[in-house]
Amino acid sequence: MLSSIMLATAAAELTIPPLLILPFILLLLSIAIIPLISPGWWGKFYSYVSVGLGAITLCYYLFVFKAPTPILHVLHEYISFIALIGSLFVVSGGIHISTRGQALPWMNCAFLLVGSVLSNIVGTTGASMLLIRPWIRMNKRRISGFHIIFFIFIISNISGALTPIGDPPLFLGFLRGVSFWWTLGHCWVGWLVAILLVLAIFFVLDMRSYRKLPAEFHTPPSPDEKIKVSGLFNLVFLLIILVAVFMPTPYREILMVLASVGSYFITSKKAQKIYHDNEFNFHPIKEVAWLFIGIFLTMTPALAYLGTHAGSFGIDNPVKFFWATGALSGFLDNAPTYLTFLATAMGLEGLDVSVKTDVVQFMNSCPAFLKAISMGAVFFGAMTYIGNGPNFMVKSIADQAHIKTPTFFGYLFKYSIPVLIPVFIVITILFFSSRAIF
């Protein structure tokens, strides 16, 4: 997380030609369009597309700018990202939650609500990897794309807005001086409103799906059917990963890798059976690793350009900060985006984001600005598959389970824009506008 600060600072010193942002745009378009045109070709060659476009940015920084520092920082950020995502993926794969037959709509809502609280304890990534498989199993008779999308909306994104553990931008703010409990104290009402609004929309869609089932499936689970959790020993490894988050690099990454290796290579037959029952394989993490190396490299000049021009965009009130931070967090890494707009907002007050006492002063004197930036960075990660790390992981696991998930554009235009944008407009009116009541 600290490397995000170093990256933003180092990259901002360079004059970024707008054309250098083109590889990032091309990569986004490739992810969105090529799977529609030729899914077979994309399945074979997506890694070459990602690495090839990333190499353009890499070579420009090394041989034209002669500035390897931003690239070294972003590669460090990528390694930390993959270490966290990968270790949580492996460890959660060793925990099996058996569900009670076919879930009723209210049970699904209760599951998502409980998962929303859990996300602030183990992070949105940890909760997503732990809960996506039981979510698929409990809805196996009628699982569809909207079940996966609303899981991403709630568990993988919006839910993580209460603690620094919940989502990387908030952890970045914590490292800079924001109190650990500040987001819980100031964002919990907005978090609750957003969760309940999205859950209400999901309930309507899920009820319609449930009513389409044959009548013999409209029976609640038998009292004899009990929820059973296997592999609880992996909670120890999960705790190790959470502790490692607060450690400095490289100890953080080393401990995460050791936790995942320890979890996966436990030799007991019972442990290996759990991975088998979860239909565990490494394809989802491989797909994320290849795609995000390109995303991390190509977004470097985009973030640098944003860092040098953010102050000239006329963003000067909480409404603008909420939407500007959010809009870019849907397509860029939300941690440095959060930092960029936090620095911009503090600059309006003559404060420096690199000075902890200034951050504390800003936190106390301008809570509406900090709340807007925090909620925007976390909430809008749900806007696209690449808006937050767990999103693509969840999609990949669903694809492996042969669930038909929406395309990139299908996700954006069928779900996130019609569902989330109205919710975020309500959040804006209630919390950040001149008529705000919270």
Image: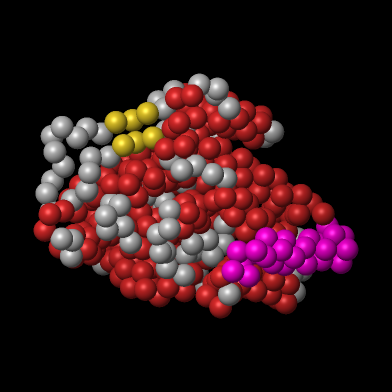
In this rendering, the count of numbered labels is 0
- Along the horizontal axis of the image, is 335 left or right of 22? left
Relative to residue 376, is residue 160 depicted above or below? above
Asked if the magenta segment contains residue 63, the reply would be yes
- Along the horizontal axis of the image, is 429 left or right of 340? left
- Along the horizontal axis of the image, is 408 left or right of 198? right
Q: Nearer the viewer, residue 322 or 39?
A: 39
Colour scheme of the picture: secondary structure
**Residue at 19% across, 54% down:** 105
- Magenta segment's dominant SS is helix
**Residue at 47% across, 74% down:** 409
Residue 355 x/y as whole percent? 61, 44
Q: Nearer the viewer, residue 96 or 326?
A: 96
The boundaries of the magenta stretch are: 40-67
**Residue at 43% across, 53% down:** 401
User: Toward which corner of the image does residue 257 lie, by quadrant?
Assistant: top right
Residue 330 x/y as whole percent? 49, 64
Residue 437 x/y as whole percent? 23, 59
**Residue at 88% across, 63% down:** 63
User: Toward which corner of the image does residue 303 lie, by quadrant?
Assistant: bottom right
